[in-house]
Image (spheres, helix red, strand yellow):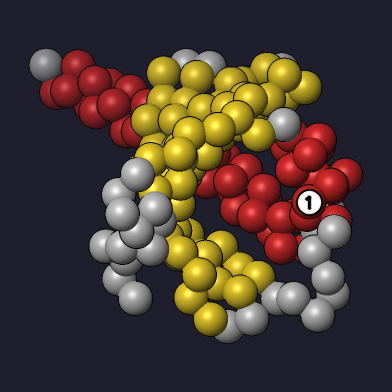
Amino acid sequence: MRLVIVLVALVFFQNISAQNSEEQKLKSKINAFFEAFHEKDTSKLKELVHPKIIMHTISITLEGKSNFKQEDFEVFLRTVVSIPETTQFEEKLLSFNIQRDRTMANVWTPYEFWVNDEFSHCGVNSFQLIKEKDDWKILYIIDTRHRDGCAQ
């Protein structure tokens, strides 16, 4: 009986360890995306995403009106490289909420966006990732952008 309990515990902890390892890979993938974004490294950004990536954004006006639009990834890349060298920007991720089922994952990251050390806006990113050939790729990004209700 004791052997059965030990084996069950071993399998349980091994499963938890594997789950934590996958969550760490997902968190690292999202952090790598923002490192490349801040460095304006479009080659690295392309490596991190799936070739069929889809991007959406929901901006919310001060009056509470919601504007939903699709963003083309190539346009996003051109926008990133067009940011002047004199402009410093940082998207600060506040936390990670990761949900995963085998080869599909969702990473939810509330954030604050800063430009030249001044607060710009806040919101939430939702990343959908898929695992192909033991590598996670970002397939879908949707985010919200607003100024009200931020911690600032």
Q: Residue at x 72, y 19 (%)?
A: 52
Task: State how many labels appear.
Answer: 1
Q: Is residue 108 above or below residue 31?
A: above
In the rendering, at what x and y percent does residue 11 appear? 33, 23
Quadrant containing the C terminus in the rendered view: bottom left
Q: Is residue 140 above or below residue 93?
A: above
Residue under label 1: 79
Q: Is residue 42 left or right of residue 143?
A: right
Q: Is residue 59 above or below residue 95?
A: above
In the rendering, at what x and y percent does residue 7 appear? 27, 21
Res 66 seen here: yes
Q: Residue at x 78, y 51 (%)?
A: 79
Q: Is residue 142 left or right of residue 66?
A: right
Q: Amino acid at mark 1?
A: Thr
Q: Residue at x 71, y 63 (%)?
A: 38
Q: In this view of the protein, which residue sits in the foreground, 74 or 11?
A: 74
Quadrant containing the N terminus in the rendered view: top left
- Numbered disc 1: secondary structure: helix
Please identify the quarter of the rendering in which residue 74 is found: top right
Q: Residue at x 77, y 22 (%)?
A: 51
Is the residue marked by circle 1 packed among few (<14), some (14-19), or many (20+) residues within 10 Å? few
Q: Is residue 87 left or right of residue 10?
A: right
Q: Residue furthest front?
A: 63
Q: In this view of the protein, which residue sits in the foreground, 82 or 127?
A: 82
Res 108 seen here: no
Q: Residue furthest left?
A: 1
In the rendering, at what x and y percent does residue 69 appear? 55, 33
